[in-house]
Amino acid sequence: MGWDCGACGKAAARFTEALNRGEAAGLIHELKLNPTGLGVEPFLIALQASADASNTAGTSSSAEAMDTEDGKSPPTADKMDES
C-alpha cells in the first residue's frame, strides 16, 4: 500500500495553516514546546531544541551511569568450583 501524495499534501497544508493561525496550541502544549511565534519555522526550531535537549540529557545520564572508577569493566562474580 503506497502513500497518497494528495492526502499528504493536504495534511501538510492544513498543519501549516494551523501553525500560522495559532490553532496548533494543543499539540504545542502536549509536546511542551515554546516556539517564539506563529508559523512553521518557530515550531520546527522549538521542536529541534526540545529533541536536542532530550538527547543531551539522555546521553549524559547514560554516560555517567556507565563510568567506572578505574575505567575497567566491573568485576564479575567468582564462579565456584562444583567438583
Image: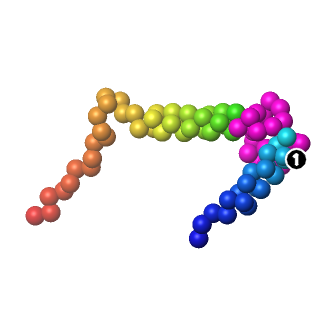
Image quarter of residue 52: top right
Is residue 10 found left or right of 52 in the rendered image?
A: right
Graded by Cα atoms within 10 Å as few (under 14), some (14 to 19) or many (20 or more), the crowding at tag 1 reads some
- At mark 1, the secondary structure is loop
**Residue closest to the far bottom:** 1
Residue 16, percent from left and from top: 79, 45
Return the residue nearer the eye: 80 or 8: 8
Residue 72, percent from left and from top: 29, 34
Residue 83, percent from left and from top: 10, 64
Residue at the location (73% across, 54% down)?
Answer: 9
Q: Which residues are magenta?
A: 21-44
Is residue 66 found left or right of 41 in the rendered image?
A: left
Residue at the location (31% across, 29% down)?
Answer: 70
Q: Is residue 10 above or below residue 22?
A: below
Return the residue nearer the eye: 73 or 37: 37
Can residue 34 be seen here? The reply is no
Residue 75, percent from left and from top: 28, 42
Residue at the location (74% across, 34% down)?
Answer: 41
Considering the image in quadrants, where does the N terminus appear? bottom right
Can residue 13 be seen here? The reply is yes
Return the residue nearer the eye: 79 or 23: 23
Is residue 64 found left or right of 71 in the rendered image?
A: right
Q: Is residue 22 magenta?
A: yes
Q: Is residue 39 magenta?
A: yes
Pointer 1: what residue?
23
**Residue closest to the far front:** 6
**How has the structure been colored for display?**
rainbow
Q: Is residue 60 above or below residue 6?
A: above
Return the residue nearer the eye: 40 or 31: 40
User: Amino acid under label 1?
Assistant: Glu
Is residue 23 found left or right of 2 in the rendered image?
A: right
Residue at the location (81% across, 37% down)?
Answer: 39
